[in-house]
Image (cartoon, grey):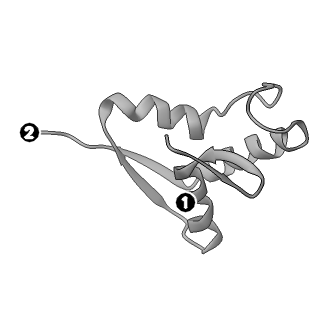
Amino acid sequence: MFPVFTDGSLKPLIVNTIEQLVEAGIETIVIVVQQEDISQFRRLFESPVDPHNEVLLYKDRKTHYVGKLRDLGRHVHLCVVSYF
């Protein structure tokens, strides 16, 4: 996942895009992924990192960020692309 630095935080570009979509009022976001990538996306939106992890963010923002990822995850639906 391509990282971007925005709002004083380093985060995946997909998270930044979803934040913007949700702020614009979009309630359901479908992300089409390959089977081998689905676990990475599930981990990001369904079970984000522990807020006590020292490497993720600045200490004062970690807990807020983890909660925000979980909230964003409620808008995200993953669809696995199948090849014929």
Q: Secondary structure at mark 2?
A: loop
Image side of residue 22 versus residue 9, left or right: left
Q: Residue furthest front?
A: 5
- Quadrant position of residue 25: bottom right
Image side of residue 59 versus residue 69, left or right: right
Q: Residue at x 58, y 41 (%)?
A: 45
Image side of residue 9 versus residue 21, left or right: right
Q: Residue at x 84, y 39 (%)?
A: 58
Q: Which mark is residue 17?
A: 1
Q: Position of residue 76 (x, y in %)?
A: 51, 52
Residue 53 position (above or below residue 24): above
Q: Which mark is residue 60?
A: none
Residue 41 position (above or below residue 73): above
Q: Position of residue 82 (x, y in %)?
A: 20, 40
Q: In whole angstroms, how far apart are the C-alphas of marks 2 and 1? A: 30 Å
Q: Amino acid at mark 2?
A: Phe
Number of numbered discs on residues:
2
Image side of residue 39 versus residue 52, left or right: left
> Mark 1 packing: few (<14 Cα in 10 Å), some, or many (20+)?
few
Image marks 2 and 1: residues in contact by CB distance under 8 Å: no
Q: Residue at x 75, y 27 (%)?
A: 55
Label located before the other in sequence (2 or 1): 1
Q: Residue at x 57, y 37 (%)?
A: 44
Q: Which residue is mark 2?
A: 84
Q: Residue furthest bottom?
A: 24
Judged by depth in the image, the label closer to the viewer, 2 or 1, is 1
Q: Amino acid at mark 1?
A: Thr
- Quadrant position of residue 17: bottom right
Q: Quadrant of the C terminus?
A: top left
Q: Position of residue 4 (x, y in %)?
A: 60, 50
Q: Position of residue 3 (x, y in %)?
A: 57, 44
